[in-house]
Image: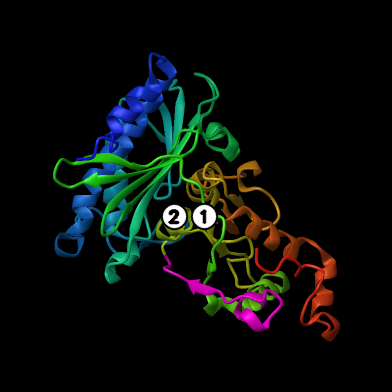
Amino acid sequence: MRSDQLSLAARLDHWSGQSGDHRRLVAIVHAMAEAGIRLSGVIAVAALENPGADTKPEAVTNASGDEQKPLDVYAEKVVVDALGGLDIAAICSEESEEPIPVTAGGAYVVAVDPVDGSSNIDVNAPIGTIFAVLPSLGPDADPAAALLQPGRSQLAAGMIIYGPATILVLTLGAGTDIYILDPRTRYFRLVREGIQLPADSSEYAINASNARHWGVGISEYIGDLVSGKEGPRERSFNMRWLASLVAEAYRILTRGGIFLYPADDRAGYENGRIRLVYEANPIGFLIEQAGGAATNGTEEILDLVPSELHQRVPFIFGNRTKVERVRRYLSDPNLRAAHSPLFSSRGLFRDQPNT
């Protein structure tokens, strides 16, 4: 064991010091990590044991309208049990329509997607748990109102990725750190501190099968990437698409690039598909703390004020210069001139080809 591989417990203990507020926040992070450790073992044998199958039939949907698998219900119970008794007023979960009460008058609220991408178990692809911690609005305030604060109010956020390794990516508002679960000791160990998105990358992530549904801005942006060295960007790009938000986010954090899940013209996709409160906000926080940017295409994700617990948004995140370029494609009406042959090789928004 290398001396620099601090345990999560040691790292959080050092961060919290003697602050009572910090220690209460750290207790929540510890609980989420313990839930992740438990879920990592369960997920590894999920195809054999089908956890939660005795609690809910297969053909149901969750609060967001997505198919709800028994594992989703089981994972929510694991998370809620882990957080029980802590200084938390309520939990917002993807699997529940209303906030789940925990401790009356609690100082914090937690937003969580217990298992993001559970359908990917069928193809042995990475899945994960996403969470965020926000302050409550006072002992007598409605916890639901606290859960609808903009993402900049988050005090901590993280995602736990269940793949070849179980990885915890965590921010407490002062940088983004990466921990890996040591299966021998069952402890998370710090492996990368204060990560920064690589400044240059030729990778982008988008579901190209939906290209016919995209608006003009996204179509033009992706078209310029696809045209490679012969196009206005004068560079070849590689597309990646794992259909797993946590896996996509981890790749962006470690290898750079950009992720796009835009709104499109399909029914139910007009306002995007990623959930703001417990998916986009925590991942946006992790990305910003690593030097990147996260937007809905035009506005910063963390500045949006949620209108309801399960609100969906378009979600674009990654290297700041790349995200800003997409913003220009989407926000300036002059872009439509790029369809003209006059601008076919280089247009107003196609300067600085190698960024």
Residue at left offset 48%, top offset 50% = 279
Which stretch did the figure color magenta?
A: 224-243
Query: From the image, which quarter does the C terminus lie in?
Result: bottom right
How far separated are the C-alphas under marks 2 and 1? Answer: 7 Å
Residue 219 coordinates in the image, percent (x, y): 67, 75
Residue 258 coordinates in the image, percent (x, y): 56, 61
The answer to which image quadrant residue 169 occupies is top left
Q: Nearer the viewer, residue 288 or 37?
A: 288
Q: Looking at numbered disc 1 in the image, what kind of residue is underneath it?
A: Pro
Numbered tag placed on residue 198 in the rendering: 1
Q: Looking at numbered disc 2 in the image, what kind of residue is underneath it?
A: Thr
Of all residues shown, which one is farthest toward the front?
A: 3
Residue at left offset 50%, top offset 47% = 196
Residue 41 coordinates in the image, percent (x, y): 19, 51
Q: Earlier in the sequence, mark 2 or mark 1?
A: 1
Circle 1 — which element?
A: loop
Q: Is residue 155 above or below residue 61?
A: above
Query: From the image, which quarter does the N terminus lie in?
Result: top left
Numbered tag placed on residue 254 in the rendering: 2
Circles 2, 1 touching at the beta carbon (< 8 Å): yes
